[in-house]
Amino acid sequence: MKVATTSFSLLPSILSDKKARLIVITGKGGVGKTSLSMASTKFLGSLDRKVTYSSFDQSPNLELLKSLNIDPLNLQVESSAQEYIAKKIGSATIAKWMMKTPFFMSLFNMLPGLGQMILLGNIINLLENDPELTIVLDSPSSGHALTMLESPANFKEMFKTGLIVEDIEKMQRFLFEEENLLLITTSLPSQMATTEAIELGKDLISRGVPQVTKVLNDSLSNCTEITNSPEEQYPDFIKAKLSMENELIGSLKGESWPIIPHFSLNKQDQVINAMAGFLKSNLEVTL
Amino acid sequence: MSGLQFKEVEIFCGTGGVGKTTLATSRALVLSQQGIKVLLITIDPAKRLKQVLGLSDSTQGVIQTIPLTHFHIEGASSFDALLMNPRSTLARIASQSAEASDLNNPIINILSKPYGGMNEIMAIIEVQYQINTGLYDCVILDTPPGKHFIDFLQSSKKIVQFFDKSFVEIFKFLGKRITSKGEKPKKRLLSIIVQSGVKKLLTYLEKVTGKGFVDDFIDAVSGLYRNREAFLTALKFQEDLKKTSFSNWFLVTSVEQGKTQEAIGLKNEALKFMHKDSFLLINKSLSPYLEDWNPKNNGDTGLFKLCNSMKARENEIKEGSKEGYKDVLFFPEVLGATPISHVVELAQSWK
């Protein structure tokens, strides 16, 4: 049950790499995407980095953000689109009118990927305008993250020419060519979740993402309360969980997945604070 | 739980990672053992069902028969399963249409890719189609997580909006044929204001997107409009869902995660669509194991703390969102490694 310390220090060092301007955190539902996103935001903030959290197209958990003292980026599809059109045609009034036409309303209803692309474009814009800024994107789960990252290519194919295609190409360069993107898939130590992360990793790389970091979250075998206690005190169900987890980690075929332990705390804000502290303390070890 | 009567449609919904797919599969297994003809459909693009049933990607969009021997259960029983693929659904609409060539449009092709964005709308059409075949006693739906499930529920509204009259005016103005072959177009006078507005809109749009897109998009929309019957039949499904005699709703939540708030949020959204025959399924419950575990209080970092936090999470989910359900069903955490062992164990809990 001993784990090499590299599995703890790898994630904080990858996260704090200054080249990583956009940190996208995805994975199967319920694996801790939101917790890791918020903990990463707090962690980078504690290193005096200029960092902000975005829940992308999902409505943010404001109560949780407030208790963690995180000020999220608030982007709306409609206003982002209106702003974009206004800039392109040089008139805010016309842009406002265009967005209200049934034609545009239908366009957005039928093409959910269009809204996602506009949000992503807006995020990249913010990053390009401020070289000091890092954005942590609490991404939709696996399949819907693919929709998001595939949207620029799809719309480029659709639009073919025009101003928007130039902007899409700019987005793609920023995302896929210039190493600004840090893409993290999160998993729980369960077969379903790790299989999904491995498949998703392959899918993302085939779509042009240069590299994918796979993280194993909520590891019971690395939980302080477990490692601090003698094995003979573990109840049978904990023993069974530990043996399943160790078998799973063994089956990851030599790949070293950065590990985040299970935190024995009741509330999500407590867990996130503990996770941010865990990242910080393991970064300092490597310095 | 033996009294839980099956209905024509059973919907499994919930936030991500709570076990919708394995629970829906275990339900399919239990019902098929009783001789009921079951179709299990997953409309989640993550398609965990594929992993549970041992299917390959190439089976997407094609109904597969799953013998119960896959779950190491003897006998000749089986159920059918479908990994929803928007492109197959679209291909079927086209094959049944006199206007098939209309749907062969670059924009429609891109949108109906598995991650192209038309998933939810195509899913509601597919489900209605499968019900109409009359081949099944029960259609079980494994839905996408959270917000995307609400998107699915709202897709019929989107279909209606899309074929909205004022929108159609634009295409009439552009001289596009929006009626089916043989159907007589209704006369409608366009005001000069609408006309000039449309003209202006298209000029601006072309500036941003290029002319090619505007032409393709107009063709795509008029093509979809001429095939609107195929889309509008799906609206019946939304109406039927409101009937208690037609559907069972299973909102799945899991003890594993601190997701009580999110589950309540989803329920409040889904309540607009749900009826009184809805059940709360609490999955991955550790209660049977925790009841017998009382470690000694040996300081702040020992098993006592772990045990207490597990018990606290368990209680939070139990107390959190019970209100408004016909019944609450508990499914203990399965301590098996493979998805198959999970399905088989969960099936025991249904019985």
Image (cartoon, grey):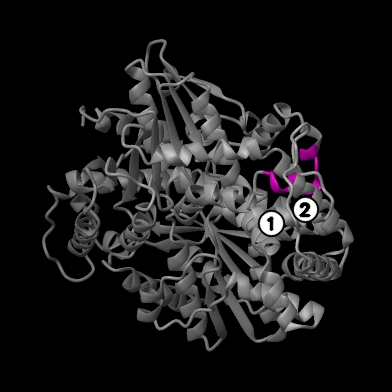
* Residue nearest the observer in this picture, B13 or B220: B220
What x and y, as percent, mark residue B45? 57, 45
Could one spot residue B117 in this view of the protein? yes
Q: What element does badge 2 sit on?
A: helix
Badges 1 and 2, same chain: yes
| Residue situated furthest top in the rendering | B76
Please report the bounds of the magenta region as a residue range.
B102-113
- Magenta region, mostly helix, strand or loop? helix
Name the amino acid type tagged 2.
Phe
Could one spot residue A211 in this view of the protein? no
Residue B167, disc: 1
Name the residue at 37% across, 25% down.
B29
Task: Give neighbour class at mark 2: few <14, some 14-19, many 20+ (Cα, 10 Å).
Answer: some
What x and y, as percent, mark residue B122? 60, 41
* Quadrant of the snapshot with the N terminus of chain B: top left
Q: What element does badge 1 sit on?
A: helix
Q: Rounded to the nearest whole Å, what is the CA distance between mark 1 and mark 2?
A: 8 Å
What x and y, as percent, mark residue B19? 39, 44
Residue B171, disc: 2
Q: Is residue B173 above or below residue B187?
A: below
